[in-house]
Amino acid sequence: MDARPPRADRLADRRTAVAVGTLVELPPRVANEALAAACDLMLAIDSGGVIRDIRLGADDLAGLGIETWLGRPFGETVGAESRGKAEELLAGTSDPGRWRQVNHPIAGGEVPIRYLMLDGTGDERLAIGRDMRAAAALQQRLLRAQQAMERDSLRLRQLEARYRLLFESASEAILVVDTASRRITDANPAARRLAGGGGLDGQPFVTIVHADDRDAATALLGAVAAAEQRHPGRIRLADGEAALMSATLFRQDRAAQLLVRLRPLAAEIEGPRDRPLSEVLERMPDAFVLTDRDLAVLACNAAFLDLVAEARDADVTGAPLPRWLGRPGIDVGLLEAQLREHGAVSNFSTIVRPRHGADLDVEVSAVKSADADGIRHGFTIRPVQPLAARGAGIAQPRSVEQLTELVGRVSLKEIVRESTDLIERLCIEAALAYTDDNRASAAEILGLSRQSLYSKLHRHGLGNLGDGE
């Protein structure tokens, strides 16, 4: 029988023999240069562990003071935590062919080097080293990245816990609605209570809306998804209760979501004991408006809708009150300052700018209140008319005494305007009396033209003016 090894083993043995033979045949000088070029550092160590020769194969190690190791024991060149590994390398107790990493202290830090110990001629040993600073830097970067990821993960978990706590404990009904399907993906306990305690996850949003208002609610969601901004709208829930609906667009998992908030109007302007009060406010002839701290309208009565020429509550709910009240950039700022300083304002003269028609002179009384839900402002708005247009209400004043009697009944601005007319009329009457009703001389005394005098006579109803005059 053929006792020779298989053909593959014979080929492997031949390649090994050729390689070993080639290295053995190299001259010692060439072999040393080849080893020095193949590694970053090569140390020749005698039997006593003293470094007898140093060869650098990498320029990165030059200038680190490694040449000072010459003539020193190898164990003294390593750090205290690496001396055990250095002793194992020198004693040859480590596994043959195993690389061991030690750290060499240098000025400003340490140099990590992995060594492989080879037996040389006689008692000398050859330590072949590889610079591990690049690998150590990568490990440090990986460690820092891992620590940063752990910190971010912890921060995200804390944020999610706070969000969930706020979401679950909020007294306001909050729902998360998918923009594409209009289905509810999440709802807080307040929303579930508002819907009768039933399950809402996966249900269409319009199931909690009254059948007559579903189109309006769907349109509001579509407007928010398209424009990202929309004033709250007034809708009725499935049980018929009126509520303010607002929505905010956000993105999650590469999909658009809507955060929908529902606030029952009964909770905004009335409690169970305040229903008679709300009915009175609704029927009172003066306009009444309730706003939040930013002067956005929360509720109003029918008189306010008539005053600003709007048709529905939804047209004004959520809109800023300065859209209709006050001269732009003037009155509302003064009104807010008075409310912040005193908490209440009485008979503040300003104007209302209706949607259609001319501006109206009004008087505003306002009060600020604060509760658990935040700051609220209540406004009553009463239209005023010039004195001449009030007819039997207040007669046109004829003397200073009559003017002073108007204090407290009309605004100072109207009193000043009427005072000017009174003084002008008294001066014209005095000039006519002085000139014995000679209007040309009266005009000269007053410094007016005859045409201007006739115009003022006609306006004040003085004298008997003919058609020619």
Image (cartoon, helix red, strand yellow):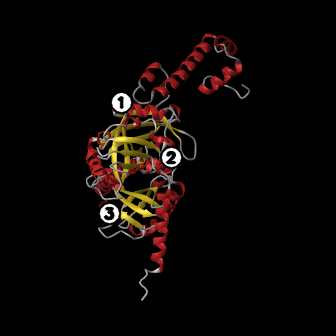
| First in sequence: mark 1 vs mark 2 | 2
Picture quarter with the C terminus:
top right
Marks 1/3 in contact by CB < 8 Å: the verdict is no
Q: In this view, does 448 lie above or below 461?
A: above
- Is the N terminus in the top left, top right, bottom left or bottom right quadrant? bottom left
Q: How far apart are marks 1 and 3 (CA)?
A: 39 Å
Q: Residue 117: percent from the left, percent from the top?
A: 35, 52
x and y percentages locating residue 77 in the rendered image: 32, 39
The x, y position of residue 380, in whole percent, is 40, 41
Q: Mark 1 points at which residue?
A: 341
Residue 464 visible to the viewer: no
Q: Which of marks 1 and 3 is in front?
A: 3
- Can you say whether 176 is above or below 59 in the image? below
Q: Count neighbours of disc 2 (C-alpha within 10 A) and say few if under 14, some if 14 to 19, many if 20 or more.
A: many
Q: Which amino acid does label 3 sit on?
A: Leu
- At label 2, the amino acid type is Val
Query: Which residue is under mark 2?
Result: 308
The kind of residue tagged 1 is: Glu
Query: Marks 1 and 2, Cα distance to the nearest angstrom?
Result: 28 Å
Q: Where is residue 391 in the image (x, y as percent from the top left)?
A: 50, 36
Task: State the CA–CA distance, disc 3 to disc 2.
Answer: 33 Å
Q: Name the residue under label 3.
A: 194
State the residue at coordinates (46%, 55%).
314
